[in-house]
Amino acid sequence: MTLLRLALRSHRTSVVVMAVIGALGGALNAAAFVQLAGTTAAERAAFGREMELLGKQLAYLLPDPVQLDTLGGYLTWRAFGLLSLVFSIWAILASTGAGRGDEEKGITEQWLAAGVSRARWLLTRSVGFVTAAAAALGVTFAATAAAAAGSGESLALDATVLETIVTLGLVLSTFGVGLVVAQLVVTRRSSGAIGAVLVIALYELHAAARAGMDVGVLEEVNPFALYARSAPFLAGGGVDAAATVALYAIAAALVGLAALAFTRRDIGAALVRLGNGRTARASSRPSGDPLLRAPVLALVDQQRWGLAGWTVAFAAFAWFLASLARTIVDSMLAIPTLAVYFERLGVTAYTDFVGVLWFGTGPFVLSGLAVTQASGWAADDAEGRLEAQLASGASRPRVVLERVAALLVITAVVAAVSSLVVFVTTDALGITLPGDRMVLATVLELAVIFAFAGIGSALVGWAPRAAVLGLGTVAVVSYFLQQFSAIFAWPEWVGRLSIYQLYGTPLSKDDWIGPATLVAVGVAGTAVALLTMRRRDVGT
């Protein structure tokens, strides 16, 4: 098998999954536009005015709302911004796999021993991802155009091609970010977590700039800001050639930098070694860290820097969102149709709106933490750490249960700190949130993560290589079901298939059926994981 074929083969599953996710996202949003905006010019003009008012208050999450009375404008605002983030996170997972995962499996060392240069190895793996990403994005935008045509709308072919090119530039630049990070740390688990946090931070940094915050020169080099300068689907819009070239230049520079770093470091080592550079003296004494001898806490302690990063990033996002709460709510209530809509839902007080804004967003972002942890579990299986654990006397059921418990502890810390930030920030704005309901809503976020942990454990026990994409697909499909079930008037049970829908709105009202179902999913998934882990050979 040639090196390029190996690079392409490593993405064969992920490219199919990402193509399906992208196609569903684009197609559903294209079909939803006709459902929401109506068919007459007057209906669409009214829809566009109201959605633009709303969109300006959702700058923390979505692109600038422009021409929302047209399909192209609506897709640019509602669909492509979030899809670009999803594809960027995939790029991080792929790049850290190429830059560190193959090395941990011993594949990189085998090819280097066969005479392949380090630069050629990394560049060929990058070419493989370029091909996979181009294919997935091509399917995404082709499906979006087909769905638009099926709904009686049309998307220009040249605009579709240009949007594909610009989005590919963004995805490749984030791939380069992950590839560089992989040279700085020694495990794929760490590089994947750091890369994901960096990408989300870049996305939110650009969102902060959209909302009016001065971020300085960082906005000029932020890949998401460069991507947003092009809007080929807007009337009178087009592609910012300089910004698009800059995206590809950043990608090329980062890949080149990663290749240079790879040639200067040892296999299995980081580019920069901390300490005095001397070899540590061998010792037969156990570590003095007491947490390493405590069940569950040992796994948490090993990820303390990752936990700190997630906590800080999530707390910053919580502060940013909570600081805009009063402005967002007042703007929404100024739109008559939205005011009626929220009144029918029983969302009338500031407390209800904060529950929708924060606890409607928080579980979705937290699920990224669960996906990252599942990636680490799969890596433990493929890279020999699971085998070492079992050889040291740990039972297979203990491994499964400790993984789930450690994820819940990590999530509890992140969720508690971020909820405290929301509580303090909204109180400073004159919005008083009930403390007992805040605690309840925060605790019930653990039910969401427990469901993801159970599903992730089952997938890792059954097919580790497909676990991360499988769990990511569950998260994205759950998001789609939550967003589109009401728009298309699907039966209630269809919406209940969404993990986020089952979470409900605990800050405003009680609905114990949903959280109980989440716990049941977590228990069932963990039980399946215990069974599959017992029956499957390690590394297969």
Image (cartoon, rainbow, N blue to C red):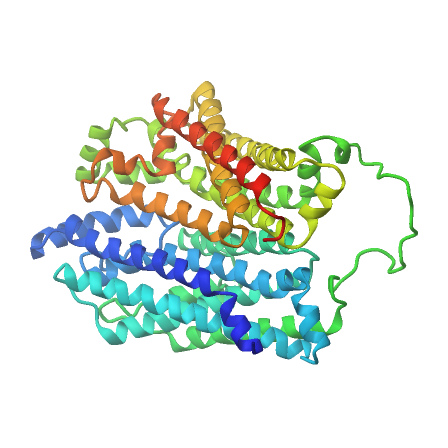
Image quadrant in which you'd find residue 530: top right
In this view, 348 is above or below 23: above
- 334 left or right of 255? left
Q: Residue at 45% of width from left, 77% of height from top?
A: 245
Q: Position of residue 502 (x, y in %)?
A: 36, 32
- Residue at image x 74%, y 37%? 393
Across and down, in percent, residue 540 comes to 58, 53
- Of residues 41 and 458, the one nearer the viewer is 458
In terms of depth relative to the viewer, which is nearer, 452 or 141? 452
Q: Is residue 11 above or below residue 380?
A: below
Residue 465 in view of the camera = yes
- Left or right: where does residue 272 sit relative to residue 241? right
Left/right of residue 513 with respect to residue 287 in the rendered view:
left
Coordinates of residue 518 in the picture (x, y in percent): 42, 30
- Where residue 70 sits in the image (x, y, percent)? 19, 60
Residue 66: in sight, yes or no? no
Viewer-closest of 114 and 445: 114
- The residue at 24%/41% (across/down) is 485
Q: Residue at x 67, y 55 (%)?
A: 187
Image quadrant assignment for residue 313: top right
User: Which of the 4 quarters of the picture holds residue 84?
Assistant: bottom left
Is 516 above or below relative to 171? above
Where the N terminus falls, by quadrant?
bottom right
User: Exactly how many numbered labels are in the figure?
Assistant: 0
Looking at the image, the residue that sits furthest to the top is 436
